[in-house]
Image: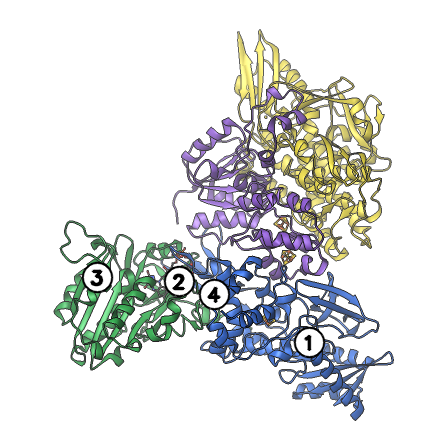
Chain colours: A blue, B purple, C yellow, D green
Amino acid sequence: MKLLEQPALDDLLGGLADRGYRLVGPTVADGAIVYDEIRSAADLPAGWTDEQDAGRYRLKRRDDDALFGYAVGPQSWKRLLHPPSVSLFRARRNGEGELQIEPETEEAEPIAFVGVRSCDLHAIAKLDRIFLGGRYVDAAYEARRGRIFVVAVNCGVAGGTCFCVSMGTGPRATFGYDVVLTELLEDGRRGYLADAASERGAELLESLAAREATPEEVAEGDRIVERTADSMGRRLDTAGLPELLAGSRDHPRWEDVAERCLTCGNCTMVCPTCFCTTIEDVTDLTGSEAERRQVWDSCFTIDFTYLHGGGGVRSTPKSRYRHWLTHKLGTWHSQFGESGCVGCGRCITWCPAGIDITEEAAALREEAP
Amino acid sequence: MAARRKKLAVWKFASCDGCQLSLLDCEDELLALAGELEISHFLEASSAVAPGPYDLSLVEGSITTPEDAERIQRVRRASKKLVTIGACATAGGIQALRNFADVEAFTSVVYATPQYISTLETSTPISAHVPVDFELHGCPVNKHQLLEVLNAFLNDRRPAIPGYSVCIECKRRGNVCVMVAHGTPCLGPVTHAGCGALCPAYHRGCFGCFGPMESPNTVSLTREWLKLGAGERDVRRAFRTFNANAEPFKTAADG
Amino acid sequence: MARTIKTDFLARVEGEGAMRVVIRDRKVADVELRIYEPPRFFEAFLRGRSYLEAPDITARICGICPVAYQMSACNAMEDACGVTVDGPLRDLRRLLYCGEWIESHALHVFLLHAPDFLGYDGAPAMARDHPKVVEDGLALKKAGNEIMRVVGGREIHPVNVRVGGFYKAPSPRELRELVEPLQRAREIALDTVRLAASLPMPELELDYELLALSSPGEYPIDRGRLRSSSGLDFGVDEFQDHVVEEHVERSNALHATLDGRVYLTGPIARFNLAFDELSPLAKEAAAEAGLAPPSANPFRSIVIRSVEMVYACDEALRLIGAYDEPERPFVETPPRAGVGSGATEAPRGTLWHRYELDGEGTILDAKIVPPTSQNQKAIEGDLYRFVERHVDLPDDELGLRCEQAIRNHDPCISCATHFLQLEVDRA
Amino acid sequence: MAEVASAYLPEPFRIRRRRRETADTWTIELEPTTGGELFGFEPGQFTMVYAFGAGEVPISISGDPGRRDRLVHTIRVAGPTTRSICGVKRGGVLGIRGPYGTAWPVEGAKGGDLVVAAGGIGLAPLRPAVYAALARRSDFGRVAILYGGRSPDQLLYLGELDRWQAAGADVHLTVDRADEGWDGPVGVVTTLIDRADFDPARTTALVCGPELMMRFTAAGLVAAGVAPERVFVSMERNMKCALGQCGRCQFGPVFVCGDGPVFAYDRIADLLTVPEL
Ligand SMILES: Cc1cc2nc3c(=O)[nH]c(=O)nc-3n(C[C@H](O)[C@H](O)[C@H](O)COP(=O)(O)OP(=O)(O)OC[C@H]3O[C@@H](n4cnc5c(N)ncnc54)[C@H](O)[C@@H]3O)c2cc1C
Ligand code: SF4
Ligand code: SF4
Ligand code: SF4
């Protein structure tokens, strides 16, 4: 384990840039900490934190200048690995007798993900299962995925809607990264415990002016992560959830939540594991060129389950919310052998109606009919 | 491919002209469009008028006079497909605010001699008068969506015009939610997508210019607005603007 | 013998209107410009709305010049609140307005008016013989629209305008992306002045009073006092002391007079009253086109509009060059009870708003005088004199020329109803 | 450079024959434009059929799995995409990818009786199973085909039905609404269960049709004594990718595109009763 003093962190980012990576990390924009292009540590949200609760997010000043003193931002890394809109192919025709399919090609960019939290590492692993681990491989995802460098950060504070501890997905990063950092803040001094889990990670750390961390520093790092684990904003009792949900399809709580649910789809858009898409066909005016695009979709739309003649299978908001929650916490287990939720809390924070997945699940359990 | 160019007609009823202007705003596509389609009736662009029947009629504006109520019947009869464009034609537009007030009083506010004005008491959408094949939302319509509708009708496919919320576009665009992060009341969750989540991208709340989405829960959104400190009057004003006569918004404004 | 020349549906104007000219014994007996566009009662339903809603609501009066409505409404509301918007925010407004001028003028010059001069029924037909002209026109129009899109959010009914300024100020980088297209647009505008000057111009002299905003050191766009060719000079708040609107039976619009006289606002008025304030390049272009004040042939308005496009490109580039991102995108405008008025120069003329607010900012009364209702009498005057001079033209030709004469003033009927058909009656 | 979506790329197939089955249904035979042999498939599997610019939809293969020289689909016009597909003339080209999904367990039915129950267009996905069974007729006990349509003019493959009967299948037809020429039974498919002769204890049943029809027919077969795990149904859900990646075809815990479309009834019987799942 190394200890990086402040300038070395800049060198770490600089080193990644030198190795050809575009840096994407947390930065303050439009009243939130978002993941966007950064150039150096100066673009990180120094001294900022976030206050998160159901349907509410506010940026707040910290009384120190910590660079990672906040929880996860509105949008996840999904945006970069599984972008909101992807062109699949172009088709050309000359009359009816000819159809040319031209695959769209994309040069996957080397990107360094800076400041990935443990829950999001788990989320990326879940996306991997869907796009790489099933019967078919999404080649574009694979290419993008293969070119990232992950700088994880162990969480120093828990957000008001975090529940990774319940989901077993944090707050300590245990896999899926090249380098992991723990931010130590003492007497106005910042230092970063740094550990590598890959060769290129180790190579990067070696190139920095960093010393070995002292056992006290390592212990301090552990304490910080433990403190975070003890201060989760939310919790979720996961015991027997898939069975509970399978048995709760007629639960009155679904009516109750449907009365509040806006079916706006925000939860699915911000969720780091929600992967659903639709296809849009576009043609040019002459009708000789067409394009197929894959775009993020949401199970909260009526079109999502549209069947000819019958309209949407899930025509009521109740059935749409039920599908979403049941998939996240229940049926994902039968499909992929694990939960679909990593406890990041985004769906809670970014729901304009403040609907809380942990509260809904608890209600289903407690008010079991 | 069709040997004959399909005939397009553009009609105007009570409106601001903005939606038909959207067609002229397709600067890059306009000439190609004029090549692919026979623009048979489009007074804003040309005084040449070819007789119907038209393959596709785009109708802008709402019905506010007895003459227009008759004219729309003739337009429908002359059109194989009829697509309404914009909030006026699909929901009655902002002039439907008269539906909630006394027209005579309105007339006398604006015009010195109200008896010269012939007008109905209501502003109603085209669909209240004739069958409509497709309704394109927006005040004004989005020109990319307008092109998509033209394209889809030319190619006989379903237009890719989703009925879900502005929020979905908002998140795809990567905006930070103004409602959650700024406490700004936003109509995005109950508003039909199509604009690309423009207002939140400009740090303001959506004001509903695309009308209600497919399953709008205005009751729940109203509750959230009140929690953010909006007054009931603000809620009523918000729902009672460009799509005031669209049923879900009408109900929401009535509280 | 009486003959009636009429057009039931005036094409290539914004909105719906008709024209009727009655000729008896080779003398013009009557001309009328009739607006049958259905009324939409904006002034009525503005009552009871919030002062902050006025820019978005009044924008819907007209899809061609929404920025004009938004800006006049903002000016009036800020006047009522006792707030002045200055510095970079005001510059941004002027920039946005330049976008609307370029877009609206290009639309009018190329798509609506040029076909009259070149003998086509519309731009699509004209494009077959003069593709370059139409393509240039569209490129110019697009450059204007790009400004609207970047600064305002979209081309029609921009979303970014608010009382006190904007919701979000564009970044200097976003504005810099407008520079190159605007430079190209300016070249096209210069060519357009030459092209417009070369068009065959029917003869006609107008003799009515001209009215425009005036503000020292700048061509009138977004603010100023009102000045007329007869020397009137009054504040925006005194507008109603001079301008009186009356309702005439044939029209769903109101007709205005200035101290009892017929008058004209718009490009011709601005050019004649504020020529000195044009940019050097715009002045040069005018000089090259043989255009100098006084310029009284309304048919030459197409040349003036082209000169104004050169100016608007120039001005937009100047504003972008000098842009400093403001610290906040708007200034606070706490409401207070009272009256506020505001006027700006829409592409087709002066647009005046006046509101009365209560202490909470609720609109108690609204009054909007659009350019087209101000110009309607002047347009009829033009028709009268034009038909008088050309009374022997065959009906078809006369009808077409009359329409062209109407288009000289780029009337916006959607605005005025809150305005056209041509009918010539020769008994 | 990576191809964005190799798995999403259709292969161009040319229509070599098309046949109108009913007023709104066509059977088309396709071959790869590049020549060569058709991919192998099992009865019950489907492909994604792309009509230029209009869209791409799942369509079951309705041809003989024993023949590798052509791909056969039977398609009913349900909306714009299927209208487009059915509008492409002989010589025209469509995009095809697949095959996808699970199969009817024809092999597993050997040694016992086979009941094939179909409603409307549902006979198309079952036809390959009928071909496969009749090709090895002697491997099976009784083979019953129960087929219902809304009206006589909506029944598919009428000429073939006679051949199947001749080849040793016991074919029963019914319609919801009879017309003048119809002298067969009137009623839903379930009413045919009693007419058919099979031994429930050693029967495998393959059911395909509208969801409600499948529910009642499967329940009817079970009531008649067929073991639920020996009854198979084919599900339909909105589907954009058929790769298990668009998430749309979820039916409770299963993905119709990969876990199905053919499911053993016992696996999904309770799901079928949940509204709006
Ligand atoms: C596994 C499977 C096998 C099928 N086999 C056949 C067959 O052999 N013959 C046949 O005629 N039809 C079959 N269908 C149904 C066929 O896919 C639909 O009729 C078709 O998708 C309708 O598309 P459309 O665009 O013409 O109609 P629209 O009603 O306009 O549908 C719009 C879109 O919704 C989706 N959609 C609508 N209905 C369905 C549906 N039932 N299933 C899946 N997606 C749907 C599609 O993406 C479609 O493009 C099958 C469906 C599935 C799932
Ligand atoms: S369901 Fe909610 S808490 Fe769980 S991973 Fe998705 S967004 Fe995060
Ligand atoms: S800003 Fe408005 S439109 Fe965007 S996500 Fe939030 S509520 Fe939805
Ligand atoms: S965000 Fe809402 S008000 Fe704004 S442009 Fe879009 S639909 Fe209209």
Nearer the observer: mark 4 or 3; the answer is 3
In the rendered structure, the answer to whether residue A68 lies left or right of residue D168 reads: right
State the separation of the CA atoms marked 4 and 3. 37 Å
User: Mark 3 Cα within 10 Å, few/some/many (few <14, many 20+)?
Assistant: some
Both marks 4 and 3 on one chain: no
**Splitting the image into four quadrants, where does ligand 2 fall?**
bottom right
| Image marks 2 and 1: residues in contact by CB distance under 8 Å | no
> x%, y% of residue A263?
55, 58
Amino acid type for the residue under numbered disc 2: Val
Q: Is mark 2 within 8 Å of ligand 1?
A: yes
Is C88 or A28 nearer to us in this picture? A28
Chain letter belonging to callout 4: A
Q: Residue A122: which disc?
A: none
Q: Identify the residue shown where x is 71% and y is 80%.
A: A230
User: Mark 2 Cα within 10 Å, few/some/many (few <14, many 20+)?
Assistant: many
Helix, strand or loop status at disc 2? strand
Amino acid type for the residue under numbered disc 4: Glu
Give whichever of discs 2 and 3 has the lower sequence position: 2
- Residue D63 seen anywhere in this rendered image of the structure: no
Nearer the observer: mark 2 or 4; the answer is 2
User: Mark 4 Cα within 10 Å, few/some/many (few <14, many 20+)?
Assistant: some
**On the image, numbered disc 4 is attached to which residue?**
A102
- Residue C339 seen anywhere in this rendered image of the structure: yes
> x%, y% of residue A358?
60, 71
**On the image, numbered disc 2 is attached to which residue?**
D57
Helix, strand or loop status at disc 4? strand
In the rendered structure, the answer to whether residue B38 lies left or right of residue C380 reads: left
